[in-house]
Image (spheres, rainbow, N blue to C red):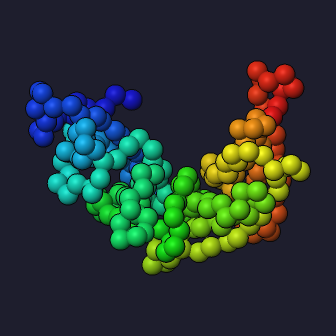
Amino acid sequence: MALPWTPLSAVNRYETVSRSYAMGFDPSTKKYVVIFILKNKENLNKECRILALGAPSWRKIHELPIWGLSQRNICANGTIYWMDELAMNGRRGIQCFSVAGEKFEVLFGPEGVKTTGQLAQVRGCLTFLCPKDASSGMCDLWRMDRNKNKVWTKTTIQIKLWDSPPVMLEIKIIGSTKRGEILIIVGSKWPPRGKLIVYDLETGKFRTTWITCPSHPKGKV
């Protein structure tokens, strides 16, 4: 799909700038939009425009987000969330954009949580996993439903790891299934291995799926 030409008014020919895009969907209005953001080398936003799919041209958004936004974003329940964390008043801030209201705001993570890590959408809710003890696989699963006064709820889970604790373990959410199960990637750099864990929120049970790697001698890791 070809997008209309994007006019720029806030940049001169000698300025170094970068462009980023995000796509969002509002389930209440069935509206798809594309957000275009222009930022300078200091990571400050210079200009922001929005395009509703099917419209002939872009519209300018005059109220810019606080900090420069990257390509790393997700859309959940009519809101686009960026994974670029902000440190504000001792708390972690998540920049977001309401598709219906066409407005940027900063959403704060749970109090006391140092990082929100990899954001994901699970059953329409913004979700992230915060490892407490990587060696034992103990993690806090945080979810937020924007329809309930933006309250975060925590579920502590323990992910079954390998018999011998690996070095430099990484645990993160990558999404969810159609049934609402959470997809969690567990991997280590040494020894190099990884697996996909499917977690059912309702039953609290896990099931493991091996990650197939055609180039690996055994075909899986």
Residue at 35% x, 66% y: name it. 88
| Residue 56: quarter of image | top left
Closest to the observer, 79 or 1: 79
Residue 80 lies, with reference to residue 10, above or below; the image says: below
Residue at 76% x, 53% y: name it. 198
Left or right: residue 210 versus residue 59 is right
| Residue 149: quarter of image | bottom left
Residue 157 appears in the picture as rendered: yes
Q: Which quadrant is the N terminus positioned in?
A: top left
Residue 25 appears in the picture as rendered: no
Left or right: residue 101 versus residue 174 is left
Q: Position of residue 110 (x, y in %)?
A: 51, 72
Closest to the observer, 129 or 78: 129
Q: Position of residue 221 (x, y in %)?
A: 81, 34
Closest to the observer, 142 or 111: 111
| Residue 193: quarter of image | top right
Residue 76 lies, with reference to residue 35, above or below; the image says: below
Q: Position of residue 191 (x, y in %)?
A: 79, 37
